[in-house]
Image (cartoon, rainbow, N blue to C red):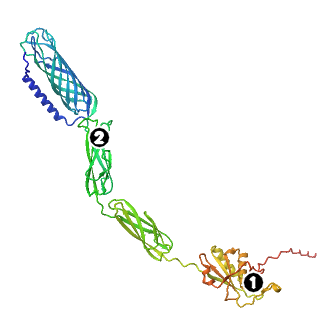
């Protein structure tokens, strides 16, 4: 029996039609589907042109038939699957005897192989290569199992995610049959199988292309400032661990294999730079597991120094009073201000932050200029000045005389008389109005003959000037209630019959007061107030009941 395979012209034409259909379907495939099924089940009608002979003649076309196939698509090879295909065709009841030269037959085909299908959201063309066996049962003759080889394809129209219509499938299947009784025909069968039906999908693989997006924050920096770069992937399998790879055409990366990295721009020239990232899924489908992206950033070389503003509060002070200096600096280039420093033309200034203190203790009257220098992170500096006017301190308070009493009583020359009491009352009023002030009572008795104190040999002249000052104090304390510690008792020279009252305000230096020069402190432990130091107030006489007048005699 001849072994040459004869491919009829109709088979060649069928293959041309299949190729045309596949190309036409590809023009409608605007993009691959977002999902790829894991498994595909097809069931439908099948027509078979056997194009072969048995003992009684050529087998006629079989219009009664069906086909079922199951395809499992591989997870790591996109669109490629393993297919198991079976079909059954029967027209054995068509002719009981070979009258017409064509006979009926039962043909069962079971094959497996590889199928490639371009999955998309509309038309999905596919092709497959099959190997297996067929079971030929001719009418009125023996049955045979024979090896079979097939190649073909078709196109599906998607209805939904799960269902599709197989618009058409054409397969060329080569096999042979060895007649038992006659050998006048070739034993090769060049079968053509046409099928259509319904397809159902089970389970899905993600098939959207993986992508990557890169960001740089901030997108524009001054040289020396860091840039944070990040890479984010999309459509990768969330169950897989991704790897990252960074490169840059400028600067130094803190890491090259992490999702986020930092670019050190120290020393970089001004310009635009790019950090590129590659995201890889090591377990993903080859050729569909890598995505790339880039992030651009600009580096500026700074030339603008910081701008500084400052002010003093208060701007006018008395010597010894501090002033607060407040400063504020900004960089036109956006650089960070790292430090402040202060200098002054007088006094002492201290501080390193945005505030400082000017100490004017000991400073001369006049303006003091304070200079503030701000330095940014790049080492550039800017400055400003502010002025503090220092006023001379006010003259210290002075001791002044506010009154004086005369002592004209020749018999009692130490005694404070009523006229002097009135003057002391005024002094007491002033002391009560100013609780921080003091008064000095200064007695004088130059050229006066002092009366004798004591009897006999113990008699001695009175210290008349001291006694007058002590008696004046006694009146202020005993009659006006003045705190004795606020009264300074002194005696002086150059006057007679007088006690001066000198006012000592708070802060006055009594020891250096010119008006008190030449006076001496009275020892009050020795000189005591006189028993008749001043006239005592009169006390009211007791009231007596008047006698009732006698009754008038009766008329």
Asked whether residue 31 appears in the rendered view, the answer is: yes
Residue 215 lies left or right of residue 188; in this view the side is right
| SS assignment at label 1 | loop
Q: Quadrant of residue 480?
A: bottom right
Q: Which residue is mark 2?
A: 234
Residue 438 at x, y percent in the picture = 64, 76
Q: Quadrant of residue 172?
A: top left
Residue 32 lies left or right of residue 416; in this view the side is left
Residue 495 at x, y percent in the picture = 68, 89
Q: Relative to 544, is 22 above or below?
A: above
Q: Residue drawn 68% across and 74% down?
A: 485
Q: Nearer the viewer, residue 547 or 511?
A: 511
Q: Residue drawn 15% across and 20% down?
A: 148
Q: Which residue is mark 1?
A: 415
Q: Nearer the viewer, residue 93 or 544?
A: 93
Q: Nearer the viewer, residue 306 or 245?
A: 245
Asked whether residue 534 appears in the rendered view, the answer is: no
Residue sitting at the far right = 554
Disc 2 crowd rating (10 Å Cα; few below 14, some 14-19, many 20+) is some
Select label 1 or label 2 by which is in front.
2
Q: Relative to 478, is 117 above or below?
A: above
Q: Relative to 112, is 337 above or below?
A: below
Residue sitting at the far bottom = 447
Q: Give the distance between the C-alpha atoms of the residues marked 1 and 2, in whole angstroms.
A: 114 Å
Pointer 1 with pointer 2, Cβ within 8 A: no
Q: Earlier in the sequence, mark 1 or mark 2?
A: 2
Count of numbered tags: 2
């Amino acid at each position: 029996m001849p072994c040459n395979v004869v491919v009829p012209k109709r088979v060649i034409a069928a293959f041309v039609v299949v190729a045309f259909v596949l190309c036409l379907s590809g023009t409608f495939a605007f993009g691959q589907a977002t999902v790829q099924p894991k498994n595909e089940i097809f069931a439908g009608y099948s027509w078979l042109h056997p194009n072969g002979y048995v003992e009684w003649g050529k087998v006629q076309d079989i219009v009664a038939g069906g086909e079922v196939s199951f395809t499992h698509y591989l997870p790591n090879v996109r669109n490629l699957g393993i297919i198991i295909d079976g079909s059954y065709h029967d027209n054995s009841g068509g002719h009981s005897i070979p009258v017409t030269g064509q006979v009926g037959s039962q043909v069962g085909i079971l094959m497996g192989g590889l199928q490639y299908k371009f999955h998309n959201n509309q038309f999905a063309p596919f092709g497959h290569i099959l190997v297996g066996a067929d079971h030929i049962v001719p009418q009125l003759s023996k049955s045979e199992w024979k090896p079979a080889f097939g190649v073909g394809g078709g196109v599906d129209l998607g209805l939904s995610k799960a269902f599709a219509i197989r618009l058409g499938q054409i397969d060329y299947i080569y096999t042979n049959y060895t007649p038992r009784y006659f050998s006048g025909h070739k034993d090769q069968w060049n079968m053509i199988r046409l099928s259509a039906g319904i397809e159902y999908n089970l389970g899905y693989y993600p098939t959207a292309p993986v992508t990557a997006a890169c960001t740089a924050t901030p997108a524009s920096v001054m040289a020396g400032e860091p840039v944070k770069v990040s890479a984010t992937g999309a459509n990768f399998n969330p169950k897989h661990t991704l790897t990252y790879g960074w490169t840059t055409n400028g600067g130094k990366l803190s890491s090259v294999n992490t999702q986020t990295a930092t670019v050190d721009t120290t020393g970089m020239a001004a310009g635009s730079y790019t950090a590129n990232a590659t995201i890889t899924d090591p377990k993903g489908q080859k050729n569909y597991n890598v995505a790339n992206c880039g992030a651009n950033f600009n580096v500026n070389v700074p030339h603008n120094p910081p701008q500084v503003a400052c002010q003093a509060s208060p701007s006018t002070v008395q010597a010894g009073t501090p002033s607060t200096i407040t400063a504020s600096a900004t960089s036109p280039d956006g650089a960070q201000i790292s430090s402040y420093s202060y200098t002054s033309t007088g006094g002492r200034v201290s501080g390193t932050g945005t505030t400082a203190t000017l100490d004017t203790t000991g400073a001369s009257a006049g303006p003091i200029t304070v200079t503030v220098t701000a330095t940014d992170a790049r080492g550039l500096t800017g400055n400003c000045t502010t002025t503090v006017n220092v006023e001379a301190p006010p003259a210290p308070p002075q001791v002044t005389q506010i009154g004086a009493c005369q002592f004209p009583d020749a018999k009692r020359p130490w005694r404070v008389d009523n006229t002097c009491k009135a003057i002391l009352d005024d002094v007491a009023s002033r002391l009560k109005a100013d609780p921080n002030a003091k008064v000095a009572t200064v007695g004088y008795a130059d050229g006066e003959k002092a009366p004798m104190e004591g009897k006999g040999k113990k008699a001695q002249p009175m210290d008349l000037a001291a006694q007058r000052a002590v008696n004046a104090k006694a009146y202020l304390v005993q009659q006006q209630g003045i705190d004795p510690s606020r009264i300074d008792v002194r005696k002086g020279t150059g006057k007679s019959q007088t006690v001066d009252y000198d006012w000592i305000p708070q802060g006055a230096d009594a020891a250096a007061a010119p008006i008190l020069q030449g006076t001496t402190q009275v020892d009050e432990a020795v000189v005591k107030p006189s028993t008749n130091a001043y006239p005592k107030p009169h006390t009211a006489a007791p009231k007596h009941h008047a006698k009732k007048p006698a009754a008038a005699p009766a008329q």
